[in-house]
Amino acid sequence: MTQHPGGAPAATRSAGQAFAALFRLLKVARPERPIHPHGLGLSGELTRTGNPAAPSGIDWLDEAGVDAVEARFSRSVGLPQTLPDILGLALRVTPSGDAPPGPADVLFASTGWRVPGRFLLRPRLDVAGATMTTLMPYRGRQGAVLLGLRTRSLPPGSLASGEWVLGLHWATPSGRWRECGELRLHAGPHPTDTPLRFDPLGNQPPGAQAYAWTRLLRKPSYRAAQRAAPPAVGHRAGGQPERPKQSTASTPATGRNAMSTVSQHFSSPAGDVWRVIADGWLYSGWVVGASRIRDVDAEWPNVGSRLHHSVGAWPLVIDDSSRVTAVEPGRSLELVARGWPMGEAKVEITLEEMGDGCRVTIAEDAIRGPGKLVPKVLRNAAISARNRETLRRLELMAAGGAGK
């Protein structure tokens, strides 16, 4: 849409007012944040590579530099993480170099990547494979510019457990995407939501401007969202107005379709625990359900190597295997564990040094087969109980010197 700033259509103004009315209604139930009610605060940096060969017409994008970033990841409607939702990532960027002082706020939402999907909100279950755009373009010297983010790598478990790396792209509304930077985000040591309020209309990137039609569409709803909460409809005894109740729910969005996760502090150092994990022949000693190890690839635990195990008790024994999909020696191991006909599960084991000992975490969930049909609440309970016992066995073997 290429509407001249002075001639924004009446339909856009009406749509903006309609959104504002909806926001005012939502504030009765959610006084603080009518949409994106719970989030996860993140911080990091944006490395801009610039666009010397094909400039976008926005100074901030076309110049190389490294910017400090504060961010908030959230789910728009606030649905349970087992259900798809519109994912949102709000960035507060402090531009470096010769850029004018002051932050720039840029909002992204989960959308498609091609035309016309890049202009359509798309509910996603989690950030794995999700693409995000600004949905509405900025105006640069050469015309309309849309920004987009694509995930390059994710931490194990949830966004709160490590570094989230995304590629920054730009495109004309119907043009191809061009990569122009890399965004790295991570949560603090005690992951929480952030009180930041983002203003993409007031805080724009250097060289970028919002079109008049986008202001008419978005500004009324932003004002409604930031306005003081309306009084509740109900009344106390005696006719006095009842104050709106403040929600005590503050569960941060994790960004991933949460796996069943258990952790335990070990008195043994991470190196001793890793020696047990790295010896494939020891798995039947600490992995609950593995009755015997039939063979171990010589490359174990490198990516692609397999552990050939049996599951169950004699005479009901199933022979299958587990394959390494990612590894960081001494720190983490990711597996796809097979046990057909029950199916396959993804398993992530991480080790974190803590003083003289370490914290070991196992995250797991079914990914294929009949096991995935079990309701998640029941599946999580069973997996968590089994992996708590697995951690107890692993701690005993590490303390006893297994694998040395």
Image: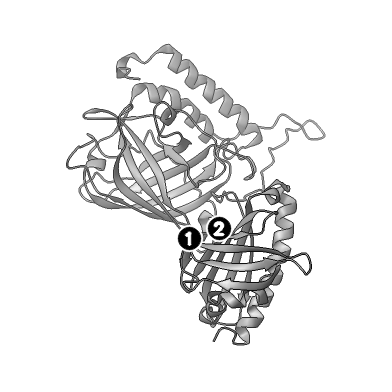
Residue shown at 26%/41% (left/top)? Answer: 61
Residue 22 lies in quadrant: top right
User: Which badge, 1 or 2, is on the more N-terminal residue?
Assistant: 2
Residue 163 lies in quadrant: bottom left
- Three-letter code, disc 2: Gly
Residue 164 lies in quadrant: bottom left
Q: How is the model colour-coded? A: one colour
Q: In this view, does 256 lie above or below 243?
A: below
> How would you rate the neighbour count of disc 2 (Cα within 10 Å): few for under 14, some for 14-19, many for 20 or more?
many
Residue shown at 55%/35% (left/top)? Answer: 123
Q: Position of residue 206 (x, y in %)?
A: 26, 39
Is there any visible trace of residue 265 in the rendered image?
Answer: yes
Residue matched to label 1? 162
Q: Is the Cβ of the residue at disc 1 closer than 8 Å to that at disc 2?
A: yes
Of the 4 image quadrants, the one containing the C terminus is bottom right
Q: Position of residue 366 (x, y in %)?
A: 64, 53
Return the residue nearer the eye: 393 or 214: 393
* C-alpha separation, residue under disc 1 versus residue under disc 2: 9 Å
Residue matched to label 2? 157
Instruction: Find numbered disc 1 in the image and state the secondary structure of the residue it sits on.
Output: loop
Q: Which of marks 1 and 2 is in front?
A: 2
Residue shown at 24%/44% (left/top)? Answer: 100
- Three-letter code, disc 1: Gly
Instruction: Find numbered disc 2 in the image and state the secondary structure of the residue it sits on.
Output: loop
